[in-house]
Image (tube, rainbow, N blue to C red):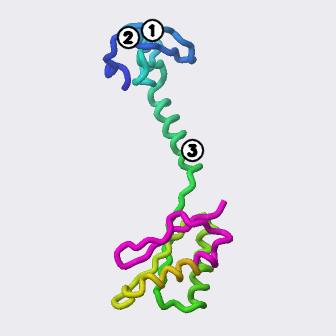
Amino acid sequence: MINEQIRDKEIRLIGENGEQLGIMSAKDAMKMAREAELDLVKIAPTAKPPVCKIIDYGKYRYELARKEKEAKKKQKVTDVKEIRLSPNIDVNDLNTKANQARKFLSKGDKVKVALRFRGREMAHVGMSKQILDDFYAKVEDIAVIEKPAKMEGRSMIMFLGEKR
């Protein structure tokens, strides 16, 4: 909120140079802001009494946008990569998929390993957990299980994350 939008009776005012000017009415603070040819901006609306500051509003918005942009730069974005397996996968194919998972994990991504069942394969769900265990055994030196294997519809899903 800025200038006339501030409807509080009493506010704590901070001057343009950062000095505390004390608690006063919003009208008096507005007069002081006009004399300095600046804006009265509510900085902390939840405080008792609310904190307002005399500053140039355009400059204030620019600084906030710059801080947000800087914070976004420092964020780490992690993707979830999916690797699909089938219950009758061969050993070499499993090794290939495990190597692919290693690449994803080394880049810092998480890996969703989905073992998909079709038709009559649903009858052998119990034996298929062994395939996910074998897959994890091949990548356990760099991976940790974030969510253990669990049936979801026609798929058995397990999430892996990078070991720290």
Where are the magenta residues, as a range? 135-164
Q: Give the residue furthest to the front.
A: 126
Mark 1 vs mark 2, CA separation in Å: 7 Å
Mark 1 vs mark 3: in front: 1
SS for tag 3? helix
Using the image as rendered, state which of residue 92 and residue 61 is in the foreground.
Answer: 92
Q: In this figure, which residue is indicated by the disc labeled 1? A: 23
Which SS type dominates the magenta stretch? strand
**Callout 1 touching callout 2 (CB < 8 Å):** yes
| Among the two numbered marks 1 and 2 on one chain, the one whose residue lies closer to the N terminus | 2
How busy is the neighbourhood of tag 1: few (under 14 within 10 Å), some, or many (20 plus)?
A: some
Is residue 21 in the magenta section? no
Using the image as rendered, state which of residue 48 and residue 4 is in the foreground.
Answer: 48
How busy is the neighbourhood of tag 2: few (under 14 within 10 Å), some, or many (20 plus)?
A: some
Mark 1 belongs to which amino acid?
Ile
Mark 2 belongs to which amino acid?
Glu
SS for tag 2? strand
Place of residue 79 in the rendered image (x, y in percent of width and height, measured from the top left): 51, 64
Mark 1 vs mark 3, CA separation in Å: 34 Å
Place of residue 73 in the rendered image (x, y in percent of width and height, measured from the top left): 57, 50
Using the image as rendered, state which of residue 133 and residue 1 is in the foreground.
Answer: 133
Place of residue 81 in the rendered image (x, y in percent of width and height, measured from the top left): 51, 71
**Callout 2 touching callout 3 (CB < 8 Å):** no
| Among the two numbered marks 1 and 3 on one chain, the one whose residue lies closer to the N terminus | 1
Q: In this figure, which residue is indicated by the disc labeled 3? A: 70
Mark 3 belongs to which amino acid?
Glu
| Among the two numbered marks 2 and 3 on one chain, the one whose residue lies closer to the N terminus | 2
Q: Residue at x 33, y 11 (%)?
A: 9
- Which of the image's four quarters has the C terminus? bottom right
Q: Residue at x 60, y 85 (%)?
A: 96
Q: In this figure, which residue is indicated by the disc labeled 2? A: 10
